[in-house]
Amino acid sequence: MRIKDWTPLYFFGYSLVTIGARTFYKKHQAIGIENIPKDKPILFAANHQNAFMDPVVIGIKLNKPLYYMVRADIFKKPAMARLLWSINMMPIYRQRDGGNTVKKNEAVFDKCFDLLHANKPILIFAEGNQGKQKKLRPLQKGVFRIGLGVAAKYKEDDVNIIPVGLYYSDTVNMGAKMLINFGKPMKINDYLEAYEKDDGSTLNTMKAELSSRMSNLMVDIQNAEYYDTIHAALFDFDDEINQYEKIKGNKIIDEFNCQKGFIAKAENWIKKNPNEANEWKESSEQLTSLLKVLELKSWLFRKEKHNAVLPILILIIGFPLHLYGVINNYLPYKLPALFVEKKVKDIHFHSSIKMAMGVILFWMFWGVQMMLVAIFTDHYIWLYYFGSLMVSAVFSYHYWIITLKTKGKLKYNKLAKNRDKRFLKLKAAYSAIENVLTKIYQ
């Protein structure tokens, strides 16, 4: 269990993710950093939706190494175990892992006590597992046992649990938005006296408190029956919800607050109007199904007809630069996507692998290209070439988005003009959900 702070591998990973987060995510924001006490033992308790991405995006927001508690089954192979220990990851054993899990965890926990006593922060995913749904699952007791264990071993320590909410607009693809929400600390010392009198009841109290705090910091849809209905509305009717919520601003926290407001109102409306809620669910299922069949996006239905002349002109004029960008950047962009599609079955790992591979491959390809240009040209042409690589890469990415949107507009106009039966059903379902939103905000 030998752990160092800035190992070469940890530093490499830290640098890689710092660069990658700025390019992989369209927007990323961290709020509440002022809630993290300085020079005190810190346990970060976060929700878990996005595999390796979750710990690393939290880690890059700190100015010192972060230590991670992860599931023990990935430590089975000795080579992998050495790699994980070298990047500050420690195993936490569950019953399913077999053997004497209690004894194994005691050794790891004792290491955690020493790390926290030395003011080295530890991240633990308090739910004990990961899931793609945007909801808080029941918390496990591990985070509290570690915090209470530090207080028992080092009585003078003021251990703080910092609740963390992670939000991704998309956990798979590039161009998403990402928010890290640090909450105010829970102080272990506030619960010590009660824990000595009744440990079981106090642990339940601590779980309830941390659950409440984490729920406030993340998108948390607790209505299981209508989860898909509410979740679909958040993204198919995001502009409408923003207008209803009257929260102005284009920061990620503004989008987050809009979604939190809508979820609370929608879940309350469902309880009061079960029959209408069922009709909403049916309309939502029909909308989702037909959008997929017709290969359309919901935002197209905000207009009766779309003008595609301007985007077509932009595509024609910009095609030469786009072609230049594709020639120079296609392989490092496409290879990570092909790799995860063919080799990585668990979709939770896609974004983190694509981001890491993308950063490495782009710099490798660009480095080789610049070296060749430098060899066969004079002066500083390679420097201008490097600038053109970055500009063309960004341009080609946005060019492709405009291409997809223009294609959607043309298809929408054609289906609307021909009065396609499936299209009309889709439009009716869209209107029905618009009416539901009006009722929710009455």
Image: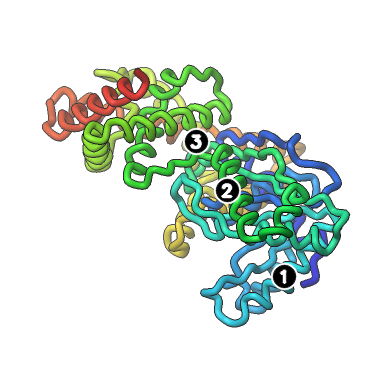
Left or right of 407: which side holds 395?
Answer: right
Judged left or right of residue 326, residue 22 is: right
Provide the secondary structure element on which disc 3 rests. helix
As measured in the structure, the alpha-carbon distance from the residue carrying label 2 to the one carrying label 1 is 25 Å
Q: Residues within 10 Å of mark 2 (few under 14, many from 20)?
A: some
Q: Are marks 3 and 2 in contact (CB under 8 Å)?
A: no
Q: Secondary structure at mark 1?
A: helix
Please give the name of the residue rendered at 43% of the width and 41% of the height, measured from the top-left corner: 221
Determine the residue positioned at 74% across, 73% down.
107
Residue reaching furthest to the front? 197
Could you say where residue 187 lies in the image, as x and y percent from the top left?
A: 74, 46
Q: What is the CA distance from the residue labelled 3 to the residue labelled 1?
A: 48 Å
Compare residues 335 and 421 and report the one nearer the observer: 421
Give the class, few, some or many, for how many residues have Cα within 10 Å of label 3's Cα (few <14, many ≥20).
many
Question: Could you tell me the amino acid type at mark 2?
Answer: Ala
Determine crowd level at label 1: few under 14, some 14-19, many 20+ residues with C-alpha closer than 10 A.
some
Q: Which mark is residue 108?
A: 1
Secondary structure category for the residue under label 2:
helix
Task: Identify the mark at residue 97; answer none if there is no mark.
Answer: none
Q: Quadrant of the N terminus?
A: bottom right
Could you tell me the amino acid type at mark 1? Val
